[in-house]
Every structure is written in C-alpha cells, then in structure tokens.
Image: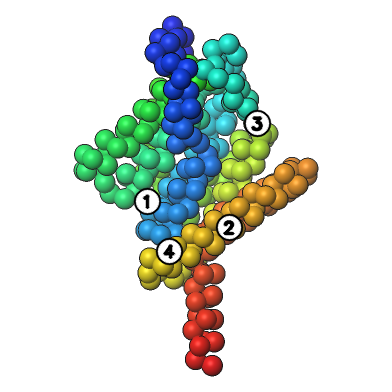
Amino acid sequence: MRLREQSTVVRDAVPTEYAEVVVFITELGGTTLLMFLLAVLFWCADRRRSALVISYAVAGLALLLSLKAVFALPRPPADAMLLPLEGEREGYGFPSGHAFAAAVVYGGLVSAYDRLGDWQAVTGAGVLIVAVSLSRVALGVHYLGDVIVGAVLGIAFVAVMNRITRDDPTIGFAIALVLAVPAAAVAGTTDALLGLGGSIGGLLATRRLEVLPALRSRLEGVVLTGLGGGFVALITSVEPVVATVEPLLVVLYAILFAGIVLAPAAVGRLEVGALESRRA
C-alpha cells in the first residue's frame, strides 16, 4: 500500500546536489507558506472565496491529524532522508500532510474562484500538487503511497466541502470546529491546537465578513498586507512563550485567525481617522 520499492526509485532519481531545490518545492505545501498565501489573497482579492479556502485548510488539517493518529504508520527510516531536516521526522507518515494540504489549498483555490474550466489554472494547480508530493518522497520523509493517498484525499475533501458549505465560509469553519475537537483529543499536538483555535477564530470572525470594507486601491492592499503580516509575525513571536501553557495556544490561534479576517476593518478605520485629521 505504501509503495516502498517505488519510493526508492524516486529517491534515487534525485541527486544530493538538488537537495535545496527539493526543500524549496516541499515548502510550497507547508503550513506557513500556504496560510500566508491564503491570508494575502483574503486581504487583496475576493475575501469570501479566500475565506472559504481558509476554512477548508483548517478543517482539512483537523481531519488529517485524526487520520494520522488512527493509522499510526511510521515514516521511512532515517537513512532514507536526502539530508537531515529538523522536525521532518516528527509525527506519523500516512497520509502525507504536505500532499493533502497542497491539494486542499491549490485545488480549493481553483474551485472557489470558479477556474475549473480554465485548463491553465487546473494544470498549474496539478503541477504544484504533484511537485510537492514527489518532493516529500525525494526527501525521504514519506513513501510514494503516502503522498498519493494524501493528494487524492485532499481533492476528495475539497469536493465534499464544496457541496456541504454551499460557498459559505462560516459553515466551513463550523465543520472545521467539529473536526478539530476530536483531533485535539486524539492527536494532542500543536497542529491540533492550531486547528481548534483557528476554527474558533474563523467561525467568530467570518460572521462579520459581509460588513468588511471592500479593497479600494492597490496601495491599501499593500498597507493591509504589511500591517496584517506584522500582526501575524507578532502572534508568531509570542507563540513559544504561550506554548508553556498549551491550552492558551487555542486562544492565541483563535486571535490569529480572527485578526486575519478582521484586519480589513482595522485598516479601514485607520484610513477614516487620517481623513478626519486632514479635515480638522
């Protein structure tokens, strides 16, 4: 099922000199980059559609952590790794989280933005999903079967979420919360707490999605990205301190996701204040 022999073929096909390139590709399916991408799209593009995909990502994270805990299958042995990477051997190996996340986010964006009929968008998403999946095998942190199941499961998850949510991000975050509670109990990891806190923050914040001010200029988008990115960096910087009391991470992550969603309202108020000062 995990295709161990075929995985060896993939690993042997990648020279050590290209290790850094493979690491770069694998980061395209990492939690940090994907969430930053979704946040920027939310701030600068269609907020409802981007929020929908964010809810898919949070719900998918919770589901995946539960599945990993249920199967409890180990990663490949340490000597299979292309190069030593800190943290890459933590957790279970099946199914692949990076392959699943790439399928949910890139596939979810194509679906949410109504680009399923655009062969370029579909091909681009497909190439990213395949590249991220194979990079995990090349790095030696997953077997080929792990990434195939992860990617297929991610695509199926998007299809199911499309039908259940009816394009409503609040419903998406409600589903995420339902999935995150057992994930936090079963997995008990920081990622599980991220799913739980993110679902709570997203559920509360998206109830005000319709009253958020629309983006009025590219400059405002730049300001919003800068201030929003600063907020995310601030939350990330205090995470190690808060992690000493793990339950507080749920609150921190709830604030993080709520802050991402409500950032346009804060920037809008700053602009109104500046205009009022000029008139005075």
Residue at mark 3: 186
Please, is residue 49 above or below residue 264 in the view? above
Residue 87 left/right relative to 37: right
Residue at mark 2: 230
What is the CA distance from the residue labelled 1 to the residue labelled 2?
Answer: 33 Å
Mark 1 neighbour density, 10 Å: few (under 14) some (14–19) many (20 or more): few
Q: Nearer the viewer, residue 232 or 197?
A: 232
Q: Quadrant of residue 130?
A: top left
At label 1, the amino acid type is Arg
Please, is residue 178 above or below residue 142 in the view? below
**First along the sequence among labels 3 and 2:** 3
Residue at mark 1: 166
What is the CA distance from the residue labelled 4 to the residue labelled 1?
Answer: 28 Å
Residue at mark 4: 221
Q: Where's the N terminus, which quadrant? A: top left
Mark 4 neighbour density, 10 Å: few (under 14) some (14–19) many (20 or more): some
What residue do we see at 58% from left, 58% from top?
230
Foreground mark, 3 or 2, reads 2
Q: Residue furthest front?
A: 17
At label 3, the amino acid type is Val
What is the CA distance from the residue labelled 2 to the residue labelled 4?
Answer: 14 Å
Q: Nearer the viewer, residue 179 or 104?
A: 104
At label 4, the amino acid type is Gly
Foreground mark, 4 or 1, reads 4
At label 2, the amino acid type is Gly
